[in-house]
Amino acid sequence: MLSLVNSSKIGHLTEFRVKNSDMETTTEFTSFELSPILIDSLQKSGFQKASAIQEMTITPILEGKDILALAETGSGKTGAFAIPIIEQILRDKENEGDYPIRYVVMSPTRELAQQTYKVFNQFGKELGIHTACVIGGESMDRQKDVIGKGVQVLVATPGRLKDLINQKIVKLDQCKGVVFDEADRLFDMGFKKDIEYILGKISDQRQLIMVSATTNMDVLNTAHKFRSHPLELKLNDDGNILVESIHHSLAMVSSDEKFPLLVNLLRKEEDHYAIVFCNTQYQTHLVAEWLKAMGFKAKPISGRLPQNKRTKLMQEFRDKEVTILVCTDVAARGLDIKDVSFVINYDLPQEAANYVHRIGRTGRAGKEGKAISLCAHEDCEYLDGIYAYIEQKIEKMPLSDGDFATDIVAKPRIDYKSLRLMDENFTRERNDRGKGREKRDGRRDDRKNGRADSKERRPRDRKPDPVIDNYVRPDRPAEEMGYQGPPVNRKVFEATAGSENEAISKAEGWFKVKDKEVFNVELLEKGKRKFIIFGPRNNKYKVTLKPIYKKLLEPFYNEMITWMGLDLEVRVSFKKPSLRVSFSGNDEGLMVKNENELLEAFEHLGKKFLSQTVRTHDGLKISVRCQNKSQNQENSLMKLVDKLAKQVVDTGKPVKMRKSLNPAERRLVHQHLETNKGVKTVSLGDGRLKKIEIQPV
């Protein structure tokens, strides 16, 4: 059995950890006080020995304790709560023949909920354990029928569960326990209010079981709010949150080199069975279609797909009919896909914790796995956070010309019109399936119950993506679609108007832009005249913004400057592919204080504003600086860089810059030498400040 070491008490939270050396467990399930029929079911499923996290959690859960179990991805956390919950139900003879809901498992994503449901069925179905899975995107009527027949374990996404509670379909008065599966992700995705609402419907005497890969203070605060003081169980005493069986490395490349390297990496893998991660759904569809054009069995998984198609796609991947799954972080958490041998981060994750969860899709259950992250200049800003999170640096891959495929076909065109059509097809298909039945999101029931306020509709079971979700119909803004979080991107506006000028006037409030020169208007459909043969037409227009960065960014920044009371002027200039923003004035010192802290904040907000309002040029590079404070330093730095680059070309040997540079300075150096075909630049070291090495090509 595993021995618990280093116990400590912090407030009401008792914490136990297990040494890494003790992680290899040989404890069989027969060592626990489990029912013989459950042990037999586990053995039939091929489970003889408990994993380390299962060994730590089974006994405390059976004793009725509240727990927070922390373990790395792929350690068997689902079984850690499923096995003792099934045992508790088998022991409970109070309602034999009746099936009230005894346990609720809340999952952050639909795919994870379906997977957890399968685990409960795998272990408990033959034992008479009745389990149901209720998630968004599937028939609510069918879910109501299943619940009506009696359910002991309910696996659900919070939004759909809240709907069913409001409609009095789900009753939790006899619920004995609640599970937060991937607890940190549940709260990161904005389900806190829904979770608190659901907990408010359950007795305070219930058991609270929380499993996660990382600690989240919102999770603990919510537990304390509902009178729970969980026992915290951690596997790693040395702080290592990475699975040791995964070999992960970093490939420093340019943006244009990413796809040729990806193709070559996949070709080198025999029987490649891989997951490729991108940061946006637009990029996901682009990479998948490009790989398909290269002859790979690749498909994208998108939040826009109807749930039945998403489920079918995941099954095709498990059956290896599809061998390369291209996705965003929707598939990075909790999904247990066996035998994935290779993970590629086409884009570095913007959140450091997601790096661990992404590469954790391989190396499952102690098997060997490999993960490679492709890092271009624009990805470098995320490296510091990843290094700090995993408390180690990532080994860099040596690359040569032979590592890049040379037979790349033309990049497929994934335009916004096709994304809109995909959205419309999804809506049409959903409505066709729902004819003659109550709407699946319960809105018709809301009207029956007198709840007409659309703002009370449930949140979606996912967050909108920064690119593919830019199409929001003006008659259904994000707030009315139930999304509780940052504003959804609004790059396209449709309006019914009598003229282009009227359409632009309506669009000004949507985009929060006043300059009429930046609007691009397209007539989608001519309307009928008001009086048959005369009178104005009510036409349908599509309005977008032209990428005139000066007219977009200068008003945006000036509004911020006025609001903050700063004495600054801003100038924006664009020369493809570089967009420069320069601040000048008496408050430049504030902008560069604390190593350019405020200046970097302005840069981040400008990028976000552009990404949410306009389709930018491919490969756009944005730099923000203070004109007077930065100009002299920048000129001196560029002179030094040019001198060192010439030295590298002349000698053929790499040169390392003596001074460590902050991210803004490093970006200037990378961009300055990008056009120099004789050299390339690489950032070295850990932390926020790094040195740059200039290498010969």
Image: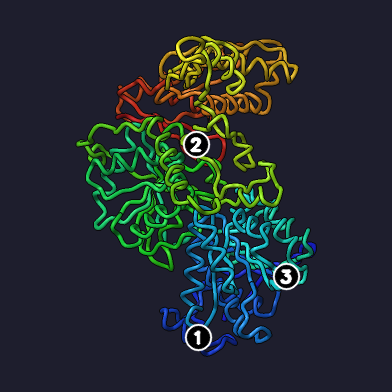
Q: Does 182 appear above or below 233?
A: above
Q: Position of residue 592 (x, y in %)?
A: 65, 22
Closest to the camera, between mark 3 and mark 1, is: 3
- Report x, y in % for residue 429: 42, 46
Residue 173, numbered circle: 3
In this rendering, the answer to whether 435 lies above or below 47 is above
- Locate residue 434, reporting x and y percent: 48, 51
Q: Earlier in the sequence, mark 1 or mark 2?
A: 1
Residue 469, label in figure: 2
Residue under the point 53% across and 17% down? 497
Crowd rating for badge 2 (residues with CA inside 10 Å; few <14, some 14–19, many 20+): many
SS at mark 3? loop
Can you tell which of label 3 and label 2 is closer to the viewer? 3
In whole angstroms, how far apart are the C-alphas of marks 3 and 2? 39 Å
Q: Quadrant of residue 670?
A: top left
User: Would residue 155 be visible to someone looking at this image?
Assistant: yes
Mark 3 burial class by Cα count in 10 Å: few <14, some 14-19, many 20+: few
